[in-house]
Amino acid sequence: MPPLSNVQQRDIDSVFHPYTPLHKLGETGTLVVDHGKGVFITDTQGNEYIEGMSGLWCAGLGFGDEELIDAATEQLRTLPYYHLFAARGTEPAIELAEKLKELAPVPISKVFFTSSGSEANDTQVKLAWYYNNAVGRPEKKKIISRQKAYHGVTIMAASLTGLGPNHKGFDLPVDGVLHAECPHYYRNGLDGESEAEFTARMATSLSELIEREGPETIAAMIAEPVMGAGGVIVPPKGYFAAIKPILDEHDIMLIDDEVINGFCRTGNWWGAQTHGMVPTTMSVAKQLTSAYAPLGAVMVPDDIYQAFVDYTSRLGTFGHGFTYGGHPLGCALGVKAIEIYEKRDILGHVRSLAPLFERRLTALAEHQLVGEARFSGLVGGLELVADKATKRAFDPASGVGAKVSSLIEKRGAILRPLGDTIALCPPMIIKEDELNALFDRLEGALDEAEGWVAKEGLRG
Ligand SMILES: Cc1ncc(COP(=O)(O)O)c(C=O)c1O
């Protein structure tokens, strides 16, 4: 490794980096990003990269969008901060709530603003508890999530998350969170089991979990339509249609976590529409503002909201809210981002590029290192395997995913290793030639990694 630059040294001397192998920082250094334009970012050394992950699945309109910058500037000049507590309001929050209601795939009555996706999902759980207390079912409180789900990192959101590193060492998950099986057909399907049979088995398994725990103790199930950070896991056909009647039968709400899926990413406004999910409530964040400011939101239907109204008439006030929830800067950017999605027809653009995205990913599924290629709209993943025929995974200690990602970086692109799945989630404004360049760099990295795997004898 070359010696660390001055800015890298200052970075590791003072910044506590999230989601980072802290013990290796001195060796690896950090990639300090200086500026961005379109789908490109440039680091402090002057190296340019195609940002194939939209940052953290969020900068859907790319970097340096002048219209968003103008909207932010104007809002900061008009009203840089105000809150929504104690019956205060701001125009941007009103406008954004109205717009979200209009776009929602199910009837929504009210929008509760947060500053992040984790806060939105934490709020969802508190609302589910509050609701069941309000309607006189104080025992109906458990929440079902799924193995490999990702719902954030606050104590409750991390508990909902079904990934080991978010639990280990943090004394999580907390009680009252159940993790159903992960509906990943490639990984969890049985020999000879069809996709339809797998879907049916997932539904039966969920039903059994509910019966075992007692349906009267379960308030809600939370699910991402396409599971993002767990490895870009696309549900098997008919999955949400199969589980919904089971949840309905037991009066269990379905919380739709659209934090990655939402705002055109999967080829519809909502992942729920792409994957046949009919939610009770929704969580949004990330592309809500194209990540130009932090903002999240929870969207609730009228019957649930009316129960809150009724309950607070007994309790006195609704005791939940965040200082920066519904920040006017975030809301103004949310309004503008949605306006841009509509007027530049970002949905049409995603749909027009999706076949190329699929084609290039599917071609890479033939690569010796790749077990499965997964995609939905403009989000995808390549699962790397030691043995294609048996689907045997690499030993996690060999760090193949991280190696591939570093080789991609060397070629001028950023993609994210989720264990041994390489995730792709490019800004939705990406052009055809830029998308092809991203795939060319990925392909080159896979070829080089193949040689490295053979040389190191990592196939076992
Ligand atoms: C599906 C999903 N939900 C929730 C979150 C948490 O959002 P945040 O990081 O804004 O707290 C994420 C973040 O990646 C996510 O992917």
Image (tube, rainbow, N blue to C red):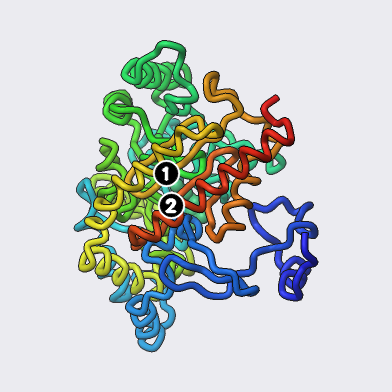
Q: Amino acid at mark 2?
A: Cys
- Mark 2 = which residue? 425
Residue 364 vs residue 200, the one in the foreground: 364
- The C terminus lies in quadrant: top right
Q: Determine whether 343 is above or below 196 in the image.
A: below
Residue 340 position, x and y percent, is 27, 69
Q: Is mark 1 within 8 Å of ligand 1?
A: no
In which quadrant of the rendered view does residue 312 lie? bottom left
Q: Determine whether 193 is above or below 88 in the image.
A: above
Residue at 45 percent of width and 34 percent of height:
365
Residue 359 position, x and y percent, is 34, 42
Mark 2 vs 1, N-terminal side: 1
- Label 2, secondary structure: give it: loop
Is residue 220 visible in the rendered image? The answer is: no
- Mark 1 = which residue? 380
- Label 1, secondary structure: give it: strand
Residue at 30 percent of width and 48 percent of height:
354
Residue at 32 percent of width and 78 percent of height:
67
Is residue 438 visible in the rendered image? The answer is: yes
Residue 245 position, x and y percent, is 27, 25
Pointer 1 local density, CA inside 10 Å: few below 14, some 14–19, many at least 20: many
Mark 2 in CB contact with mark 1 (< 8 angstroms): yes
Residue 105 vs residue 66, the one in the foreground: 66
Q: Amino acid at mark 1?
A: Gly
- The N terminus lies in quadrant: bottom right
Residue 110 position, x and y percent, is 27, 56
Gap in angstroms between the C-alphas marked 2 and 1: 7 Å
Q: Determine whether 196 is above or below 71 in the image.
A: above
Residue 29 vs residue 255, the one in the foreground: 29
